[in-house]
Amino acid sequence: MSSAPRVLNGLAIASDIKAEVAGEVATARSAGYTPGLAVVLVGDVPASQIYVRSKVKTCAELGIYSEMITPPATISTEELLAIVASLNARNDIDGILIQLPLPAHVDTPLLLDAVAPEKDVDGFHPVNVGRLLSGTGGDDLLAPCTPAGIMQILKRSAIPVAGQNAVVIGRSNIVGKPVAAMLINASATVTVCHSKTHNLAEITRQADIVVAAIGRPGFLTAEMVRPGATLIDVGINRITGEAELAEFFPPTHPEHADRRALWEKRGSTVVGDIHPAAFAVSGAYTPVPGGVGALTIAMLMKNTLTAARTRREKASRERK
Ligand code: NDP
């Protein structure tokens, strides 16, 4: 009989990373500087407000200075470019994060390109994307936070990556493509699938590692998975209906009692892109919630510290 799958606890890994960052921030502060993050939140999108609040709160917990800039949704691209330019010029700001999505009238690519690459803690600037793709970024690379978090989960859980078949489902610029690049850099053999892929199940059944970043609840089912594979679930999908709940968490399975109780209380629950029945045949998996999602803010904090350190090291080299 195969053994029970390992649950890769993103909350515990994120908490370790945050503790390490807090220690290094304390060292930076005693050396005379405080890493600083500026978050630009345009308009009043409720989900964005929640994300930004938790980023600011985590900064405070780790000793990182943070500042929120909250222009109204009517702000123009030119006015936003001026805000970014002033943040680029400030010595007390090491990281600049522009919370997405921006209002439709704002030129988002132009704005993201305007962030100084050395302050681009989201890792979306073409210079940082290029460094990631060329594999030349080293430890100083400001890489996108969610994919970087996935690599930390694999590394800290001692899941072998080199030489393994990794299949990434999804090719977005924020998750699918960068995680594929990171897996290649870590010497995996990588296949990227998307909505036009033929025979997707045949491909995923060959995988030692599957990263699902699709945005469709329970897309990857047990039949699509090789027993024993490692499953990384990036998806965040809210389900509300009773039929959907029963599909994911059947009342006949006592292990789902807590989740069903939570749904009763809140009227909804969050699930990933991987069906719980697929987790059951895996060797290891990241749960939703409590998996990949937990790492994203921790990696943002790590990037802010890296940006602060790298900029000061560069300035000190230039003074010599
Ligand atoms: P996008 O919508 O940008 O990309 C989704 C990808 O899935 C696309 O490449 C799309 O293919 C592919 N896809 C859609 N349908 C299918 C299908 N039927 N078969 C195969 N591929 C398909 O999403 P994101 O990458 O931004 O996010 C993905 C998920 O991850 C979402 O649930 C999101 O909420 C979550 N997320 C979680 C984060 C975290 O911190 N945990 C951070 C970021 C995202 P195509 O390109 O052909 O359209």
Image (spheres, rainbow, N blue to C red):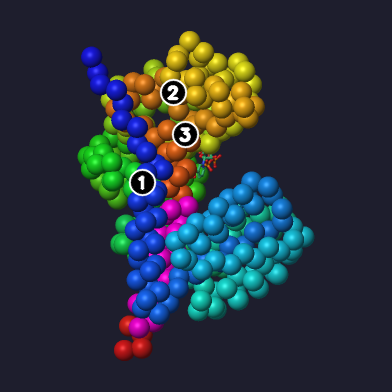
Q: Which residue is drawn at 37% across and 27% down?
A: 204
Res. 168 in view = no
Q: What residue type is labelled 3?
A: Val
* Residue 13 marker: 1
User: Which residue, given by chain and number where applicable, does mark 2 sit on?
Assistant: 276
Q: Is mark 2 on a helix, strand or loop?
A: helix
Residue sticking out furthest to the right: 74
**If the image is split into quadrants, where does the N terminus sit?**
top left
- Residue 52, position in %: x, y? 59, 55
Position of 79 with respect to 299 (left or right) is right
Q: Name the foreground residue: 105 vs 2.
A: 2
Helix, strand or loop status at disc 1: helix
The residue shown at (55%, 53%) is 54
The amino acid type of the residue labelled 2 equals Pro
In the structure shown, which secondary structural element does the residue marked by tag 3 occupy? loop
Q: How crowded is mark 3: few (under 14 residues within 10 Å), some or many (20 or more)?
A: many
Residue 171 is covered by the magenta coloring: no
Q: CA gap, disc 3 to disc 1?
A: 14 Å
Q: Is there a contact, CB below 8 Å, between mark 3 and mark 1?
A: no
N-terminal of the pair, mark 2 or mark 1, is: 1
* Image location (x, y in percent) of residue 143: 41, 57
Instruction: Kindly identify the residue that appears in the image at 64 percent across and 21 percent down.
Output: 241
Q: Where is residue 13 in the image (x, y as percent from the top left)?
A: 36, 46
Q: How far apart are marks 2 and 1 (CA)?
A: 22 Å
